Amino acid sequence: MRLPPSIPSLFRLDRRTFLRGAALAGMGAALPGLLSGCGNVGEPIGPLEVDPAQPWWLQNNFAPVADEIEVFDLEIRGALPPELNGFFIRNGSNPRSGESPHWFMGDGMLHSVHLEGGRALSYRNRYVRTPLYEKGYSGLEGGLPLGGNNQSNVSVIWHGGKLLSSGEVGAGYAIDPNDLSTIGVHDFDGAVTTSFTAHAKIDPATGYMHFFGYWFAPPYLTYLVADATGRVIHRQEIPVRSGTMMHSFAITESDVIFWELPVLFDFAGIAVHGFPFLWNEDYGARVGVMPLGGEASQIRWAEIPPCYVFHELNAYRDGGEIVIDVCRYPRMMDGEIFGTYEPHLHRWRIDTAGAALSFRDEILEGELISEFPVHDRRFSGRQHRHGWFAEPRRYAETIDVGGVVHRDFATGRLTSWDPGLAIGAGELFFVPGGPGEGEGWLLSYIYDRSRSESRVAVLDATNVRRGPVAEIVLPQRVPHGFHGCWVPGTLV
Ligand SMILES: [Fe+2]
């Protein structure tokens, strides 16, 4: 089904003018209370309750939704910045069968809101039409994730005029951003023979997309570059000893950085925690550095203390050193419940000046629990001043992500928005709204237990403490998920 004709913007406001107008109208003081759980309906909200008889990823707001819907002209609380013109699309695990052996193993479902001229034109959700979805499989019934035989549930990436869904293992899928329909398996004309990572990096200087795939057999690690049109122009197989769960990587203006950590592909993991990977500290841990767009033979490695990192905030060159800020766990995939290990912000420095790499690890925030790091992608690979994080709450039995934390890396100052226990947020996505680093908006799908209501929250990235400037009320529950992206403009 096609979208309604686009609604022309009645007026154009830049971000500063919009915020000034909001402040004059008294919204700056009033909205946080209105939007963030004050004025809740019903009884006061206590901590999350978890039914031990079923997996945490099938209950509370992790439980899948069954219906695919599209609804137009959504309610907005607050004032939606009129400059936000585009689609905010997020992927997540939503098992069609209702059963899944692990949070990572449900069928990929995409959720999208379309914003234009201060209005929320539509919401829709669609499964990615994978063979596993079509057959109604849950978990590992579908066999190895060869080609499109994967759940495609981890992220969405906008590059080269294409929206790509990634399941981390196996090939990605091309998706129509207008209606979220599945166009088909997208293997970059055969260049991707193993996997398409969920965390591709786009170099702001060239528009090139740098990405990789990990696999269970040689080649265990493949590095690829697609030009700004999405055509693969470079492919290198990088020798490593085994298949490890390599969730992300980083680039600078001149480097590619991998971290090979001791979470190994191992079928024994299925019996331990429903997922075929296991912590194996004997394997060791290391970081690898090679030139951006370089040859596999140029990679250099440095041993590091065993740990696990899903996500980095960003990386950049500082003279002879590479700086990478990461959300670091002490270990992972050893049968733990996710809340067992807390991620903290560390700064890794890799000195590349000598014949051998040297590595240093500094704890930037030892108390703050931080995940889903977000930066202004206009500064990908360049020194960042601003970083935003979602702040998981401490639960032994489940995951519960609370508010938003901003860190100013020039001063070390932290500011945060705590939405209260009723609200669980997710990853934020930064959408530029001004010329300077960090001038823009943070968007996140949130769930409010007090109202049994999902919303998209929009925050001023330069003032997260204020809470959302607007919230878009969604017509059905959106389960907590993984990663999203912003598709700018009005598509047809
Ligand atoms: Fe991720």
Image: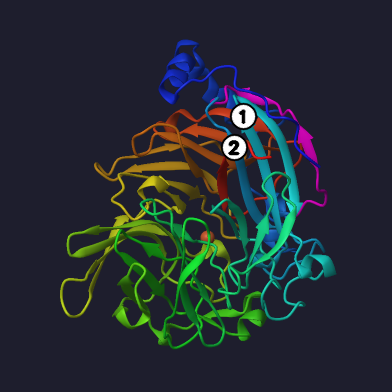
Tell me the residue that label 1 is attached to. 116
Residue 41: quarter of image: top right
Residue in the picture at 29% in, 63% down: 254
Residue 133 placement (x, y as % from top left): 79, 65
Residue type of the residue flagged with mark 1: Glu
**Residue 5 appears in view:** yes
Tell me the residue that label 2 is attached to. 86
Left or right side of 428 for 462: left
Residue in the picture at 61% in, 58% down: 164
**Residue 448 appears in view:** no
Residue 478 placement (x, y as % from top left): 70, 46
Residue 468 placement (x, y as % from top left): 53, 30
Quadrant in which the N terminus appears: top right
In front of the other: 57 or 142: 142
Q: What's drawn in magenta, residue-wise?
A: 64-81
Magenta: main secondary structure equals loop
